[in-house]
Image (cartoon, rainbow, N blue to C red):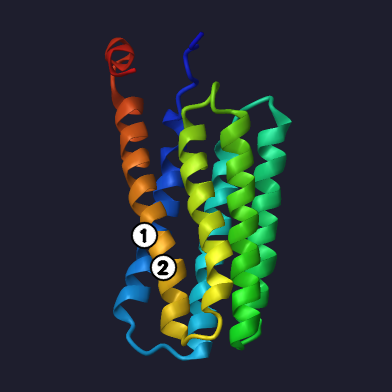
Amino acid sequence: MKGKLEPATGMWKPLLYRALVALVFGLVTVFWQNPSTTVMSVAGGLYLVGTAFAVLLLDLSFSTSDGRIKRTLRVEHLGLLALSVFALSVHQTWAFVAAASAGLGIAGLCELYLGWTHRRRLVLARDWLLTGAVNTAAAVILPFFATLEAHALLGVIGGSAIIIGVMLLLAALTYRHEASAPAGSAEAVN
């Protein structure tokens, strides 16, 4: 039995912000040819900070009585924020790999949890499943590249950021369009 999913029309702004953060970071990693370890730490740390802020915006825009969503988003936000501070302050490859892997892992697992538990209720759950899977995969893969140069490490995270950015950009624009559509035409879209 398939029920109607709760729309995510009010979530387009936080998703758009997160998409832009991910796309900017992804493009920086593609075009910066020889980043130093310090540049890697700062760029990666700023990406985690930007993602943490986007998760906070999403949390604040949620008007749900389901406390699990808000608690999980806060865990994700605080985990990303704490690990971004670590990545920004310690400019060593192993420290960056540990911080980035842990941050992406926390974000990925939180989003997989939210996506899985709300997949029959929220349209946004589909986005969480994808972003969660991509972040978790990047977190698992990143340590295998720890012996390589900064460009390769940023490339792994940047590749996942580009995937997330494109997907969330499309989702945000879709939700924005649905929010501006008249009530009668929104049912035709669903």
Q: Decide: is 1 above or below 157.
A: above
The residue nearer to you, when weighing 132 against 141, is 141
Residue 45 in view, yes or no:
no
Residue 174 at what x, y percent from top left?
32, 34
Residue 11 at what x, y percent from top left?
47, 36
Q: Quadrant of residue 188?
A: top left
Q: Quadrant of the C terminus?
A: top left
Q: Which mark is residue 158?
A: 2
Q: CA distance from mark 2 to mark 1?
A: 6 Å
**Residue at the farthest front position:** 144
Residue 170 at what x, y percent from top left?
31, 42
**Which residue is depicted at the point 46% across and 28% down?**
123
Residue 91 in view, yes or no:
yes
Q: Which mark is residue 120?
A: none
Pointer 2 with pointer 1, Cβ within 8 A: yes
Q: Amino acid at mark 1?
A: Ile
Q: Is residue 1 left or right of residue 152?
A: right
Label 1 crowd (10 A; few <14 / some 14-19 / many >=20): many
Q: Which residue bears the numbered disc 1?
A: 162
**Mark 1 secondary-structure assignment:** helix
Q: Decide: is 83 above or below 40.
A: above
**Which residue is depicted at the point 63% across and 27% down?**
64
Q: Amino acid at mark 2?
A: Gly
Q: Decide: is 59 above or below 138.
A: above
**Which residue is depicted at the point 63% across and 83% down?**
94
Q: Decide: is 76 above or below 140.
A: above
**Mark 2 secondary-structure assignment:** helix
